[in-house]
């Protein structure tokens, strides 16, 4: 079963993808998940200030600069994993370094398979 691990953090303390991979705990997590064969993809997202939000109301397309929600914590990236069940997905998320960093969290959400 596939899951998305959505990484949320306080953008004021976020670091770049290069800085993440230079941190031993991030490199170790990535290496272990690759070795286990559960990592299917993922990316680090640019800050929410670089986002553009699109809404369509009837025939009108509404475009706004910035994120969908104005909150301190934003989705900073995600990983797609494939594993046996929710228990394994939660174990993988708990091993991720982000939940141990200040206000960061990892939301685990199953992919809706068609």
Image (cartoon, rainbow, N blue to C red):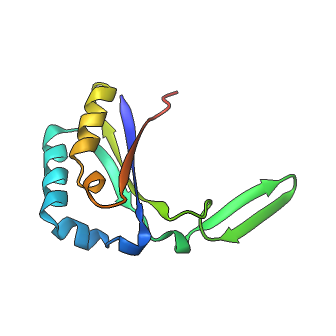
Q: Pick out the residue farthest to the front.
A: 102
The residue sitting at 79% across, 62% down in the picture is 61
Give left or right: position of 66 versus 113: right
Image location of residue 39, percent across then percent down: 26, 44
Quadrant assignment, res 52 = bottom right
Q: Nearer the viewer, residue 46 or 91?
A: 91
In the displayed structure, would residue 46 be above or below residue 98? Answer: below
In the foreground, 81 or 48: 48
Residue drawn 43% across the image and 70% down it: 11
Q: Count the marks.
A: 0
Q: Position of residue 108 (x, y in %)?
A: 39, 40
50 versus 2 height, above or below: below
Which residue is located at x 52 percent, y 27 percent? 114
Outermost residue to the right? 59
How far across and down, in percent of the image, does residue 5 sit? 37, 45
Q: Where does the N terminus fall, quadrant-wise?
A: top left
Q: Is residue 37 above or below residue 10?
A: above
Task: Give the answer, above or below, for where 9 lies relative to 37.
Answer: below
Q: Is residue 42 left or right of residue 54?
A: left
Whole-percent x, y for residue 84 in the image: 28, 25
């Amino acid at each position: 079963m596939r899951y998305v691990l959505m990484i949320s953090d306080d953008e004021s303390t976020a670091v770049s993808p290069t800085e993440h991979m230079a941190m031993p705990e991030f490199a170790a997590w990535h290496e272990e998940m690759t070795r286990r064969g559960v990592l299917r993809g993922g990316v680090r997202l640019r800050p929410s200030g670089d986002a553009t939000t699109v809404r369509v109301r009837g025939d009108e397309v509404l475009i706004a600069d910035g994120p969908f929600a104005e909150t301190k914590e934003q989705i900073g990236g995600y990983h797609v994993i494939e594993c046996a069940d929710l228990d394994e997905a939660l174990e993988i998320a708990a091993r991720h370094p982000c939940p141990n960093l200040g206000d960061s969290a990892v939301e685990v959400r199953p992919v809706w398979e068609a």
